[in-house]
Image (cartoon, rainbow, N blue to C red):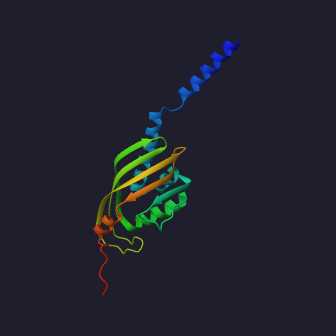
């Protein structure tokens, strides 16, 4: 009887382990969430963004230290401000790398700044630059992310740096 019990337990464990996603499948699923997130931002699809970003998501960015994103709603407000600053904003994924619950993204941002951006007035100029994002997922949703880009290059392309000389 003990032998039958052991065989049953081992068989059930094997079935349970085998039923979960393989590590490669989970990594691909995580990358797909990120692809959908970028696509939703490019399309202005707030409902998909709402579906993909966790309610208590946190965004970290040294390039915009005055912008605090500590929830899904904070991010949507940030995103709507960003959409008002740029016409035709576009993020293009250049590279995705997944490990565990993290996805690293190298991407290109392009757009024309025809609305105010924080303290900077509309410039009417185009910007095109690389940025990096590391995204942590929980239960298939974006829970936390770290964004980095070269602010100096971006501000220079937009004509905001160097600052105009005071008269």
Q: Which residue is pictured at 42% across the width and 55% down the height?
A: 41
Q: Nearer the viewer, residue 27 or 165?
A: 165
**Extreme residue in the right direction:** 1
Q: Residue at x 41, y 64 (%)?
A: 63
The answer to whether 23 is drawn above or below residue 122 in the figure is above
| x then y, percent, for residue 23 | 47, 34
Rendering coords of residue 52 (x, y %): 50, 50
Horizontal and vertical percent position of residue 97: 39, 43
Q: Residue at x 47, y 59 (%)?
A: 60
Quarter of the figure that contains the N terminus: top right
Say how many tags the image has.
0
Vertical relation: 64 (above or below) 31: below
User: With 133 as the anchor, is 54 left or right in this view?
Assistant: right
Please state which of residues 55 and 43 is positioned toward the viewer in this rendering: 55
Q: Quadrant of the C terminus?
A: bottom left
Residue at point 44%, 41% (across, down): 99
């Amino acid at each position: 009887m003990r032998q039958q019990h052991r065989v049953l337990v081992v068989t059930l464990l094997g079935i349970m382990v085998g039923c979960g996603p393989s590590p490669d499948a989970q990594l691909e699923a995580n990358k797909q969430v990120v692809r959908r997130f970028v696509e939703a931002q490019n399309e202005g699809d707030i409902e998909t963004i709402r579906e993909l970003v966790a309610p208590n998501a946190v965004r970290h960015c040294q390039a915009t230290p005055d912008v605090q994103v500590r929830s899904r709603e904070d991010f949507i407000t940030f995103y709507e401000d960003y959409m008002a600053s740029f016409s035709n904003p576009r993020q293009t994924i250049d590279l995705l790398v997944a490990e565990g619950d993290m996805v690293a993204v190298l991407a290109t941002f392009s757009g024309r700044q025809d609305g105010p951006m924080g303290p900077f007035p509309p410039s009417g100029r185009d910007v095109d630059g690389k940025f990096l994002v590391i995204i942590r997922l929980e239960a298939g949703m974006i829970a936390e992310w770290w964004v980095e880009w070269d602010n100096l290059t971006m501000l220079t392309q937009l004509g905001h740096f160097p600052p105009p000389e005071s008269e």
